Amino acid sequence: MKQNIGSYERIARGIVGLGILSLAFVGPATPWGYLGLVLLFTALVGWCPPYALLGISTCGKTGSCCSGSSCCGK
């Protein structure tokens, strides 16, 4: 899997994912809060399946999401 999520978006997804996940435990305590796990997973892995299907990449031209051998655009 090639990473297709840039570093700033990964940070934002992690923060928003934690916020949504907290809704499963506090506040309305609905199971919908578990959708935050999807955002947390994509933030940790750096790959978003819908982005891959649509050919979208937020890595930028400088390869801001490169890590080791799995680098954007390579």
Image (cartoon, rainbow, N blue to C red):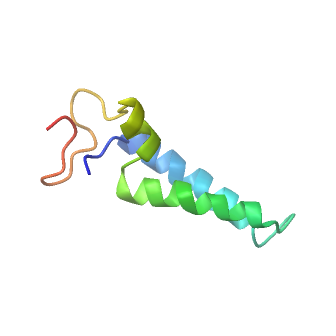
Q: Nearer the viewer, residue 8 or 5?
A: 5
For the C terminus, the quadrant is: top left
Q: Give the image location of residue 66, x and y in percent.
A: 21, 45
The front one of 73 and 11 is 73
Residue furthest to the top in view is 61
Tell me if residue 3 comes above or below residue 36 in the rendering.
above
Indicate left or right for 39 with 1 as reference: right
Observer able to see residue 41: yes
Question: Does 2 sit above or below residue 56?
Answer: below
Residue 35 is situated, as x and y percent measured from the top left of the image, at: 64, 58
Count of numbered marks: 0
Question: Which residue, as the protein is rendered here, is positioned at the far front?
Answer: 53
In-image side of 42 versus 17 (left or right): left
Residue 19: percent from left, percent from top: 67, 58
Q: Observer-nearest residue: 50 or 65? A: 50
The residue depicted at 52 percent of the width and 46 percent of the height is: 12
Q: Is residue 54 above or below residue 30?
A: above
The residue shown at (72%, 62%) is: 33
Is there any visible trace of residue 23 in the rendered image? no
Name the side, left or right, on which 60 lies relative to 27.
left
- Report the residue at 46% width, 40% height from top: 50
Q: Residue furthest right?
A: 28
